[in-house]
Image (cartoon, grey):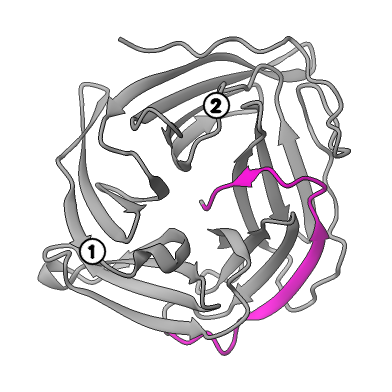
Amino acid sequence: MPKTIAAAATALTVLATGLAVAGVVGSARPAHAALSDVPADCSAFTAAYRSDGQRLSYGYSGGETSITAYTDDVLGWVPSAHQQLGGSGDDTIFRSTEYAVHPTDGWLYLVRRQGELVDGEWRVTAKSATRLKSGFADTRILATASPYLYRVAGTSLYRYTETYVDGEFTLSAPVKLASTGWNTVNTLVYERSGGTGNAAVDVLIGTKTNGQLKEWRINRATPKTITSKVLRSVGWAPFTSLSTGYCAEHPNGRPLLGIKANGSVSVHFDANKTDGDGTDIQGGPIGSLGWTEKAYGQ
């Protein structure tokens, strides 16, 4: 049975950190630092949750940053791991589907949200969190590469196969791909897939406690076959959230949006996302979020 999320108050109060806003998209504002080496056509976004379960979204697009908080967009708990699955909508309505791991009960939930523009104000008008699969205790990171879901817990990396039948998600039993070393991975996000047949791979990138920005290539047919490359060897340890995005006029490149535990934000641009070489990555800090809530890679 779906578990309905408790309704939030009808309006949000001004946050103590200074982020305001009841049910409205925070207005875009210039990034604190002008980054001429990050193309203006690049965009990247990520989700976060406040300690009271209120969802926030942070974005960097066209050299500007924005924060979004919708009325009634309250989950009621802060996921230990979160992953966007998909969304759709137009100028008056949106729908999204997400994975979220409960911090204490050990379950993976399927979260569905619907938002509508009502009297000029965006608000979430329907939401649900349905228990999907148990066995997710201690999960720190989720990364989806349909039809696969990757999970980091403890020192291990797992993979699940996702099926979608008659409008419902199901996940297979987990396959443990690696049992050591993954406790040093701070962030992990799916970037792309490549190759064909037995050579097809999922490419994920992330940061490590030793400061590395790293790329992993996981063979889809034999997923315990994992190769990796260090893109950058120092400076990336403080990032607790890493997201990739898209550059409309630079399709071979990628933006990297990083958030640190202290709330500071950086944006970088990798001109060639497939070369396995991070020496050309440019960019840097763009300022502070104004809050230190838990953010997730997307």
**Mark 2 residue type:** Trp
Q: Position of residue 207 (x, y in %)?
A: 50, 69
Residue drawn at (68%, 18%) of the image: 123
Residue drawn at (61%, 64%) of the image: 239
Q: With respect to residue 75, does 203 lie above or below?
A: below
Image disc number at residue 13: none
Can residue 62 be seen in the rendering of this structure?
A: yes
**Mark 1 residue type:** Ser
Query: Would you identify the image quadrant in which residue 74 lies?
Result: top right
Please name whichever residue, 102 or 217, is drawn nearer the observer in this view of the structure. Answer: 102
Please name whichever residue, 42 or 218, is drawn nearer the observer in this view of the structure. Answer: 218
| Residue identifier under label 2 | 77
The question of residue 34 being in magenta is answered with no
Return the disc, 2 or 1, that comes first in the chain's sequence.
2
Q: Position of residue 221 (x, y in %)?
A: 12, 63
Image disc number at residue 179: 1
Residue drawn at (74%, 74%) of the image: 284
In the rendered view, does 62 fall on the left or right side of 32?
left
Element carrying mark 1:
loop
Say if mark 2 contacts mark 1, CB within 8 Å: no
Residues rendered magenta in the picture = 276-297
In the rendered view, does 80 fall on the left or right side of 49?
left
